[in-house]
Amino acid sequence: MVKISTSILSVEPEDATRKFYDLEVAKTDYFHIDVMDGKFVEANTEEKMYEYTNTIKQISNLPLDVHFMVEDVKKNIDKYLSFEPDIITFHYEALKNKEEIYDVIKYLKANNVKVGISIKPATPVEEILEFMKHIYLCLIMTVEPGKGGQKLIPETIEKVKKLKEYLDREALETFIEVDGGIKVDNAGILKNAGADIIVSGSAIISAGDMQDVIEKMKKGV
Ligand code: DX5
Ligand code: ZN
């Protein structure tokens, strides 16, 4: 069964606490926290996500799956370490060279955080293969990072398959996470392509019955 990481990006401030409770009841596996700095992507969610994470930590023990769409990766890691996130994912495109990437991997591991590396739709999967044996997951963006509610880019599904083949061939246990435009009707395609963790925002948050949507996505039907 795939795991579901619910993006809280589209949660409205006035019903945030209630939504977070409901999401736990609805059996989300993770809270997915989308941190955007207004530089790596246009939107800036720094303040909102920091507040939301604070609220979540007060009411829930569910693991945090933090997705940084930021230029200054180190600064943001330091900001989020106090929340004891389970996973921190940063963008391959945000760092200048391999040395910086290995440096961040080491830093996260030293702080007991599982490491994720994400790639945008235009970045070929081949560019990040060498890091796979050192990290916990690879997040393949299925939309252009920056906002919720977009349509999944079909070409990205091939990237999931390619990465899955590579991981199987190398006998690596690195997880594949997918994020953007995922709903009940396309979750199964991603699961079959090799995804282990599905991030979904608007499809879950706007649903009348969040538990039903999460259940269906987990089964991949
Ligand atoms: C996009 C974010 C996603 C996104 C998910 O930049 O990383 O987590 O908001 O939301 P939906 O499921 O609405 O595409
Ligand atoms: Zn995300």
Image (cartoon, helix red, strand yellow):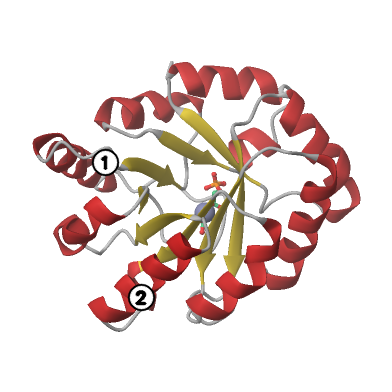
Residue bearing the label numbered 1: 157
In the image: residue 97, left or right of residue 220: left
Please tell me whether residue 157 is drawn above or below residue 115 in the rendered image.
Answer: above
Give whichever of 108, 25 is nearer the camera: 108
Q: Earlier in the sequence, mark 1 or mark 2?
A: 2
SS class, disc 2? helix
Residue 103's place in the image compared with 219, above or below, is below
Name the image quarter holding the N terminus: top left
Q: Is mark 1 within 8 Å of ligand 1?
A: no
Picture coordinates of residue 42 (x, y %)? 55, 76
Toward which corner of the image does residue 193 lie, by quadrant?
top left
Picture disc at residue 103: 2
- Residue pictured at 23% horizontal, 60% vertical: 131
Foreground disc of the pair 1, 2: 2
In the rendered image, residue 80, in percent from the top left (x then y), is placed at 64, 66
> Farthest residue toward the front?
110
Q: Is mark 2 within 8 Å of ligand 2?
A: no
Instruction: Specify the quadrant of the image occupied by residue 19.
Output: top right
Dot 2 crowding, Cα within 10 Å, few <14, some 14–19, many 20+: few
Q: What residue is drawn where x is 66% and y is 25%?
A: 27
Q: Residue at x 34, y 62 (%)?
A: 120
The amino acid at mark 2 is Asp
Amino acid of disc 1: Ile
Dot label at residue 28? none
